[in-house]
Amino acid sequence: MALSGPQKTVTQTVSLVLVMGALAWASVPFYDWFCRVTGFGGVPGQVDVASDEVLDQTITVRFDGSLNQGMAWDFKPVVREMEVRIGETGLAFYEAHNPTDRPIAGQASYNVTPYTAGTFFEKIDCFCFQEQVLAPGETVQMPVSFYVDPEIVEDRDGKFVHTITLSYTFYEIDLPEGYAALEQDTTTDLN
């Protein structure tokens, strides 16, 4: 059955809106995947094992920590800078403190600058891979282990990088179910 003019227009419009909605929905996870795979935008890679090659050359890694607007934690790197050999596994810590009287869940987003280093900065383990929940008054130190891929010294742009900055920004997320019930009980007890 062939559609008439107005029906055809409505069908095409609805189809276009559905396709555009699907593309918009898929763009965020696709872009995230793309950045992780390519290092685009300073997103470091994630690996399961350390490098098997360590060079005599060193590189300085700086650490930065910030909070998204409205996040009530205190958050900072324990050490602001370290020098590591290229390919050597480094271990750094960030400290987070919840000064409030309620549990707060947070998730960290991260990037590496300069952007050309994102392809070569490999994280082995990181607190940013999962949500963090801090109880009222709790302070924790969260580790990140990493290395700089030795291929950086062969890269056309990477070989000129001598300092890399790893930045994290924590933002508040919804509490997991068990914590949400605990917060509800605490609020009820105060009233």
Image: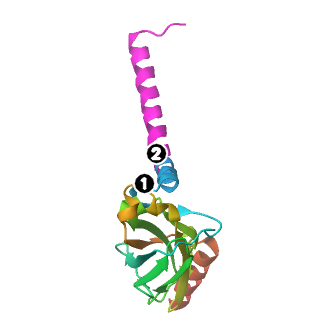
Residue 27's disc is 2
User: Quick one: SS at disc 2?
Assistant: helix
Residue 116's disc is none
Asked whether, in this view, residue 187 is left or right of residue 82, the answer is right
Quarter of the image with the N terminus in it: top right
Give yes or no for residue 9 being in the magenta stretch.
Answer: yes
- Name the quadrant containing residue 179: bottom right
Residue picked out by circle 1: 40
Of residues 65 and 2, the one drawn nearer to the viewer in this rendering: 65
Give yes or no for residue 152 being in the magenta stretch.
Answer: no
* Point 35% across, 64% down: residue: 160
* Point 46% across, 56% down: residue: 39
Q: CB of mark 2 within 8 Å of CB of mark 1? A: no
Coloring scheme used: rainbow
Dominant secondary structure (helix, strand or loop) of the stretch shown in magenta? helix
In the rendered structure, which amino acid carries the disc numbered 1? Phe
Of residues 98 and 178, the one drawn nearer to the viewer in this rendering: 98
Classify 10 Å Cα crowding around label 1: few (below 14), some (14-19), many (20 and above): some
